[in-house]
Image: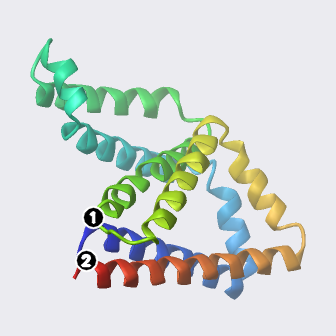
Amino acid sequence: MSGLVICLLGLALLMFVVGVAGLGSRETTVKVLLSVPRNMWLGRILAVVCLLWSAWLLKDAPLFMQVVSRFCSPVTALYVLTPIAGFLVLRYLDELLAARALGGIMLLVPTPLIVGAREVDTWWRYVILVVGYAMVIKGVVLVLSPFMLRKGCEFWNKSTARWYSMCLVALGWGVFFGALALLAGRQLS
């Protein structure tokens, strides 16, 4: 199974769980969603995941290797800079860290989508590219203005109709990502 199929199945599962949880118990889901932006431990965990994933991606980036190899070994630089960056982020960027880290993950998740879409030579790979770049834009918005996560949660929670429509949209995205995963799996096999 390719990275594209795994990533699409993960997104489908995530959207399906969000939709079902929202339809199941609105009050509990709203309480959890409103507490996410200021949750310190969730922010730290997501920030560490972002840093490790970024270091892993940089390890394979040729431009990074060329620039850093002028000064020292690139792998050594990653081993030194990743913990330093982690310490600095956890020490000085604790305000709304979970929302920022969630935005960072939304910046990183499209990488396997876009790289995997190169392997598939059909018309629907452009759909994957558009979804990937839309996730990048949303990730940039969350990193730069993390309060937008809370505002979005409050917007969807204003009325019952809005809430249930958001949950149905999440379920629809889950079905959409699942269908794309099936198409990608069929095309790649």
Instruction: Please say whether residue 158 is visible from this viewpoint.
Output: yes
Which residue is at the front of the view, 143 or 116? 116
Residue 139: % across, % down: 56, 47
- Residue 116 occupies which quadrant of the picture? bottom left
Q: Which mark is residue 119?
A: 1
The amino acid type, in three-letter code, at marker 2 is: Leu
Disc 1 crowd rating (10 Å Cα; few below 14, some 14-19, many 20+) is some
Identify whether 116 is placed above or below 18: above
Measure how far apart labels 1 and 2 are at the Cα level: 8 Å
Along the horizontal axis of the image, is 140 left or right of 155?
left
Residue beneath the point at 17% across and 31% down: 79
Residue 41: % across, % down: 48, 50
- Residue 10 occupies which quadrant of the picture? bottom left
Q: Which mark is residue 188?
A: 2
The amino acid type, in three-letter code, at marker 1 is: Glu
Q: Quadrant of the N terminus?
A: bottom left
Instruction: Please say whether residue 109 is visible from this viewpoint.
Output: no
Query: Residues at badges 1 and 2 in contact (C-beta under 8 Å)?
Result: yes
Residue beneath the point at 50% across and 26% down: 92
Mark 2, secondary structure of its residue: helix
Q: Give the mark, 1 or 2, whose residue is nearer the N terminus.
A: 1
Residue beneath the point at 83% across and 60% down: 155
Identify whether 181 is placed above or below 103: below
Q: How is the image coloured?
A: rainbow
Identify whether 14 is placed above or below 89: below
Q: Residue furthest top?
A: 71
Residue 160: % across, % down: 87, 78
Identify whether 129 is placed above or below 20: above
Along the horizontal axis of the image, is 82 left or right of 12?
left
Along the horizontal axis of the image, is 112 left or right of 158?
left
Q: Residue furthest left?
A: 73
Residue 135: % across, % down: 54, 54
